[in-house]
Amino acid sequence: MEAFYLGCPSLHLHPSPGLEPKHTHVAFLKTHKTASTTMQNLLFRFAERNNLTVALPVQSCTHQFCYPRTFTSHFVHPHTLPPSIITNHMRFNRAELQRLMPTDTVYVTILREPSSMFESLFSYYNQYCQSFKRVPNSSLEAFLEDPWRYYRPNEKDSMYARNTMTFDLGGDKDRPPADTEYAQGFVAEVERVFTLVMIAEHFDESLVLLRHLLSWDLEDVLYLKLNMRTLSSKRSLSPDLPVKIRHWNALDARLYDHFNASLWRQLSAMGPACVAREVRLLQKARERLVRSCFGGGMPLLRSAAQIKNKELRPWQPSAKVDIVGYDLPGNLSQGTSSQAQELCLKLIMPEVQYTQVLLRSQSMRYRRGYQPQAVQRSQSPKQSMRSLPPRHSQAGLHRSQPPTTSPQGPRSGPGSTSTSAPRPARGTVQGSSQTQSRL
């Protein structure tokens, strides 16, 4: 595989004398409907290649950390401790993650443009979120015409119906848009905590920044898009709907606009030519990987019913939404090593199945008494982004109290069956006596 160069415009091979080793302690907050499943798959494969432990949910939580309840370390399966990486869905709680993860952990998340994201949420969770189910004819237009007619802030799965990214990040999804002090404070807290906020619409460019941040190689950031809907499951938005969506999801819109601008400032600092060259290298390497796995161009997307291997069938949220996946060609084993076959399988494995596979393998390792490399909690945080130094320190935030009730098991798919999520307890954000956050 062609080397992925770290220097730009002066290119150097990796590893090279003077370059830092790969950073292996990563907390990725997996937000909803933002290409985060693709990113999770990338992190799972990185962990397996480097013999790292991934924190996974206890079985009563299935494949999420008992979302939408605020994360607590009690939700982590004991066979997946101590972890180097955490990436399954959760509602962010930095205080609990600090207790769990190494001190030099890099925090990363991803955001998506609110209007396209909300259309996806409305389609994907239409049969689970009561705020969506009660809308006549499943009309997004009708919902946006009068959201408060259908939306109930405290009912089950309401977090899918308003400011979902804010909720996932631990914020107050129902804070009025007029409360600009809260909104500004929340954005500032997210910026202090997360060293990199990726943008779904600029996924490859975000991966360039991630690779520099973590000192990773090209093979570490290769991917195929996962958890996608068919075109027939998507709605086209009339010209007036994006404005209404952004108004209804004002906190999410503010988050996205801020961090989209931040991403492009970082890319500009690297140099447009450098970024473009690295994106081309990434795309060419991905094409080579796809050819080796599928024997030609991009694999055909298939419905779950068409996929023979049950380990590769994506979860279907409802009969109204068709989530597509991939299948491996039947002749893959001819002239292909078992290691290469395993790589191809994991590249297209859906979230639920991959989480189960990882839990089985890590539980076997745990029972054998094998201990991966000890987590160094005493070391000081690394400054591993050489061309892009971290924008902020990771200062302490207000500690959220863990929930006192027992975990509720979410659905077998990306939705959740936990009881109505209580309104977030509010802790004062440092630096403002009025702004509050659950980061």
Image (cartoon, rainbow, N blue to C red):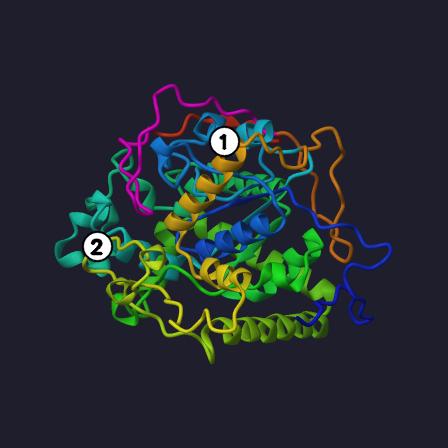
Instruction: Name the spot of residue 244 as percent of width and height, x first.
Output: 33, 58
Question: Residue 437: in sight, yes or no?
Answer: no
Instruction: Name the spot of residue 157 as percent of width and height, x first.
Output: 28, 40
Q: Is residue 372 left or right of residue 200?
A: right
Q: Using the rendered view, name the quadrant where residue 58 is placed.
A: top left
Dominant SS type (magenta): loop
Residue carrying label 1: 79
Q: Using the rendered view, name the quadrant where residue 381 is placed.
A: top right
Q: Is residue 309 left or right of residue 91?
A: left
Instruction: Name the spot of residue 124 as percent of width and height, x first.
Output: 28, 55
**Frontmost residue, 353 versus 270:** 353
Q: Residue furthest front?
A: 334
Q: Is residue 321 left or right of residue 243?
A: left
Vertical position of residue 180 compared to residue 256: above or below: above
Q: CA distance from mark 2 to mark 1?
A: 33 Å
Query: Tag 2: residue type?
Result: Ser
Range drawn in magenta = 397-422
Residue at the image position 18 percent from the left and 58 percent from the top: 319
Instruction: Name the spot of residue 120 as percent of width and height, x first.
Output: 33, 58
Q: Is residue 304 magenta?
A: no
Query: Tag 1: residue type?
Result: His
Q: Residue furthest bottom?
A: 296
Is tag 2's residue or tag 1's residue first in the polypeptide sequence? 1
Residue carrying label 2: 318
Residue at the image position 38 percent from the left and 62 percent from the top: 116
Question: Residue 403: in sight, yes or no?
Answer: yes
